[in-house]
Image (cartoon, rainbow, N blue to C red):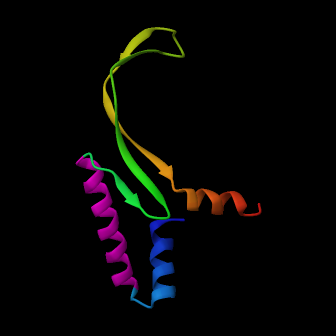
Amino acid sequence: MTKADLVETIFGKVGLSKIESQKIIEVIFDIIKQTLVEGESVKISGFGTFDVKKKNVRRGRNPKTGEELQISARRVITFKESNHLKDRVEKTDE
């Protein structure tokens, strides 16, 4: 599903115009992005939690050459699904 698909779904289900639906999606994503940039978690009840984790400097190896190198510290975003979402996905027939 793409952002455009979300806009179409809101347009079809809620009845807002496509422009209004797109603005809503953009605002929601901007809020989520800004919150994560600030290092805060985003918890969406019934869906899951986005967290920002800090990774320390660590040693790594170039898989092509075998050369050892240092991987710099960084922040990464992780997602942990809610139990409700996890249960629904597991129960869905493939």
Nearest the camera: 7 or 28?
A: 28
Q: What residue is shown at x 72% (from left), y 61% (from top)?
A: 91
Question: Residue 55, position in %: x, y?
Answer: 35, 29
Q: Identify whether 77 is placed above or below 5.
A: above
Direction from residue 93 to residue 25 in the image, left or right = left
Question: Residue 21, position in %: x, y?
Answer: 38, 80
Q: Identify whether 23 is placed above or below 43.
A: below
Question: What residue span does the magenta drawing correspond to?
Answer: 18-38
Question: Residue 63, position in %: x, y?
Answer: 54, 16
Q: What residue is shown at x 43% (from left), y 9% (from top)?
A: 68
Direction from residue 48 to residue 27 in the image, left or right = left
Q: What residue is shown at x 51% (from left), y 72% (from top)?
A: 5
Residue 31 among magenta residues: yes
Nearest the camera: 5 or 31?
A: 31
Name the quadrant containing residue 52: top left
Q: Identify whether 79 is placed above or below 44.
A: above
Quadrant containing the C terminus in the rendered view? bottom right
Q: Which residue, as the protein is rendered here, is positioned at the far top? A: 67
Q: What residue is shown at x 52% (from left), y 56% (from top)?
A: 82
